[in-house]
Amino acid sequence: MVIRALAAIAVAVSIVALTVWASVGVRPAEAIPAFARQYDMQCNACHTRPPRLNRFGEQFHMMGFQIPSASRPQGIVGSIKEDGPAKTLIDSLAFRIVGGLFEYSESPRETEVKFEPPHEIELFIARPITPDLSLYVELEYEPKAVKFSRDRGYFETEHEFGLGKEAFFMLNMGRLLGALGAPTMEMGGQTMVGRHGGFTMHGPMLMAGKIDPNTNFSYATNRQMLDATELEIEKEPGEERGEVHRLPVVPYAFASKFFGLFKNRNEREPQLVTDQVMYNTTGAPGADFHAMINDVVLAQVGFLSENEGFNAYGALRYDLLDRRELTFNVSALLNWGFGVVRSPDPEEHERPGGTRLDRLRYGIAANLKWKALDVYGAFIVDHLYGLPGELRSDFDVSAAGLTLEVDYLIHEQVMLSGRVDQLWAGGLKDQKMDATVVSFQAKYYPWQNIAFFVRDSVNLRKFHGDNPLRSWKNQLFVGIDWDF
């Protein structure tokens, strides 16, 4: 009840604020989230439109949410002295409401039309603590969270509140390298490695906690205009538990891609073919090191906890073009997972077996930005290793995915997006199916940080009612994405 009350109060305050902004004619630039308030900038200084980052926004994130020339030498202490504790606190908070308001889903068996509230309400705490240290924490409330039940079913809870996808600190280690003898230079109290006019390195930056490292990749899975749709559960009347009815539409390049795998043995939780995993997780405990060398090459290494194992990764991004309104970069990824997933039992495929599998992931991505046009895509391949001999004739150990998205800001307040997702699935041969989905979306921004959207996803493959990947033909959503 307390959580419901807090959510209701937050929504009510937001509606009142929006009414006030509209009535007094305040310009969109004044309705801005935490980092923009801290640096007195507009949201569009960092975003093409939220959540996509422009070139400046990518550098801002890479530098630990800091602008060296504008940072306070005393960090949060200086902010409290100059602005007072109340303003410092308010400027450290941001709020987001996202999800569908209306859904239309069509399949040969049935057509669903329903109204429902947004599926995520998020509170962010984001603040530079010192010029070299920043904090980022996300708290999340889900009105209809879906969690796995040990007795091989799923259930929908009324609500769930807790730590969100990301909660980490970011530390600039330039000062440490300087203490070890590396040449350094100071900018706004932040230490950078190198010399003016010569070799320079932003960082290395340490990001540790519950992290999503792929923001630095040419295709940032956590910063796309078309959000993942919801996992749909089919339940009998009066029952809490149910079976998976429809898998979410996600960028298939970064999905798990395999049918029949399990996350763990004791809980018996399956790994869905559309789960975002490895380097492309939506958030997992780990540590990431990244550095930008000579403003051209971004190098990144790190490790993440995953299920019963962990994975290590390395990525490189090369910025080929950076001229005024034209930027182009390409990225390469190599990711090895050590015992990160369970194979099915050779005798009974509906339960996890005793073997933990390794996973190799590798691929490329590219991103082109030109004025109001943003094009990005990725091709990612996955291989499994260590499969029991009894399963080899029943299981494909290789899979691949391709995702291509185009966003075009046709007007200051209108963003059009289109995405193609292709999955060449692996896993149990009697379960696996490939998938091809095309999605279109129009977003209207009455303010920079508030958007209403209409989205339509179309399954281009043959309908299969017994397979949740293709148990639909068309999904239409009307929703809201509100950051403040």
Image: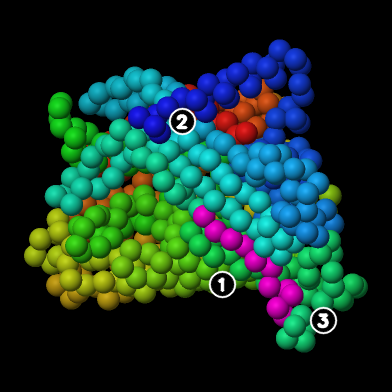
| Three-letter amino acid code of the residue under disc 2 | Leu
Question: Residue 19 appears at what percent x and percent y?
Answer: 64, 16
Mark before the other along the chain sequence, 3 or 1: 3
Residue at point 20% right, 48% down?
A: 149
10 Å neighbourhood of mark 3: few (<14), some, or many (≥20)?
Answer: some
> Which label was assigned to residue 183?
3
Quadrant of the image containing the N terminus: top left
Magenta stretch in the rendered image: 167-177
> Which label was assigned to residue 6?
2
Look at the numbered disc 2 and give the secondary structure of its residue: helix
Quarter assignment of residue 128:
bottom right
Question: Residue 97 appears at what percent x and percent y?
Answer: 52, 32
Q: Is residue 383 one of those drawn in magenta?
A: no
Taking the image as shown, residue 93 lies to the left or right of residue 79, namely left
Residue at point 76% right, 31% down?
A: 29
The answer to whether residue 421 is visible is no
Which one is nearer the viewer's eye here, 116 or 10?
10
The answer to whether residue 196 is visible is yes
Quadrant of the image containing the C terminus: top right
Q: CA distance from mark 3 to mark 1?
A: 23 Å
Q: CA distance from mark 2 to mark 3?
A: 51 Å
Asked whether the beta carbons under mark 1 and mark 2 sit within 8 Å of each other, the answer is no
Residue at point 45% right, 36% down?
A: 120
Mark before the other along the chain sequence, 2 or 3: 2
- Which residue carries the number 1 mark? 301
Q: CA distance from mark 1 to mark 2?
A: 39 Å
10 Å neighbourhood of mark 1: few (<14), some, or many (≥20)?
Answer: some
Look at the numbered disc 3 and give the secondary structure of its residue: loop
Taking the image as shown, residue 275 lies to the left or right of residue 442, namely left
